[in-house]
Image (cartoon, rainbow, N blue to C red):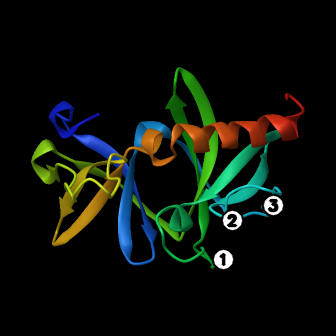
Amino acid sequence: MGVAEIIETTQCLTFKLEEEIFALDISKVREVLDFTAITKVPRTPEFMRGVINLRGSVVPVIDMRLKFGMTKTEQTVNTCIIIVEIHLDGETTVLGALADAVQEVIELGAGQIEPAPKIGTRLRTEFIRGMGKRDDRFIIILDIDRVLSADELALVQETEGGINGNS
């Protein structure tokens, strides 16, 4: 969804990774969990921290900091797992996104959202829906459906299916 499609107010859940503030469309967020034990799955990419048991379901957890080229998330009292629904190729996948801290649910009007920056062709920015402006800070609004590539998402789904015994 491009900025042109954001006509009315968008509700977003904001969270921190290092010193940056990111946001997800609230309709993609199922719930926010306190940090819990994550079981590492062998032979998965480094950003894939493992899986958690969410009321009997296996949910893959990705480290958003590692995914964005930052340092690995260290557990603190504020570390949490944002449970999101990702849609790709007609399939829905539930996964956990590790964040340093969840902040708040905010509303951003169309006038507060700028298009994602164009930073040449080598840097991938298609997973950024736009840049929200609030007070004097920018909020990076993510398109969570595009944060993982199709190949990475297939790997996440294989991990989920393999552990649930569906493979």
Residue corresponding to mark 2: 35
* Nearer-N-terminus badge (3/1): 3
Name the element at disc 1. Answer: loop
Q: Is residue 56 left or right of residue 72?
A: right
* Identity of the residue furthest to the right in this view: 165
Tell me what residue is drawn at x 27 percent, y 41 percent. 10
Quarter assignment of residue 129: top left
Question: Depth-wise, is mark 3 or mark 2 nearer the camera?
Answer: 3
- Tell me whether the residue at label 3 lies in contact with that at label 2, contact meaning CB atoms closer than 8 angstroms: no
Quarter assignment of residue 47: bottom right
Residue type (three-letter) at the residue carrying disc 3: Lys
Name the element at disc 2. Answer: loop
Residue type (three-letter) at the residue carrying disc 1: Gln
Question: Depth-wise, is mark 3 or mark 1 nearer the camera?
Answer: 3
Residue corresponding to mark 1: 75
Q: Is residue 166 left or right of residue 142?
A: right
Q: Give percent across and percent down for residue 60.
A: 70, 48
* Identity of the residue furthest to the top in this view: 90
Residue sitting nearer the eye, 105 or 65:
65
Name the element at disc 3. Answer: loop
- Tell me whether the residue at label 1 lies in contact with that at label 2, contact meaning CB atoms closer than 8 angstroms: yes
Q: Give percent across and percent down for residue 23.
A: 37, 55
Q: Give percent across and percent down for residue 65.
A: 52, 68
- Badge 3: few (under 14), some or many (20 or more) residues near its Cα, within 10 Å? some
Which label is found at residue 40? 3
* Nearer-N-terminus badge (3/2): 2
* Identity of the residue furthest to the left in this view: 111
Q: Is residue 145 left or right of residue 39?
A: left
* Nearer-N-terminus badge (1/2): 2
Estimate the spatial distance between the alpha carbons at disc 3 and disc 2, rounded to whole Å.
14 Å
Tell me what residue is drawn at x 66 percent, y 64 percent. 46
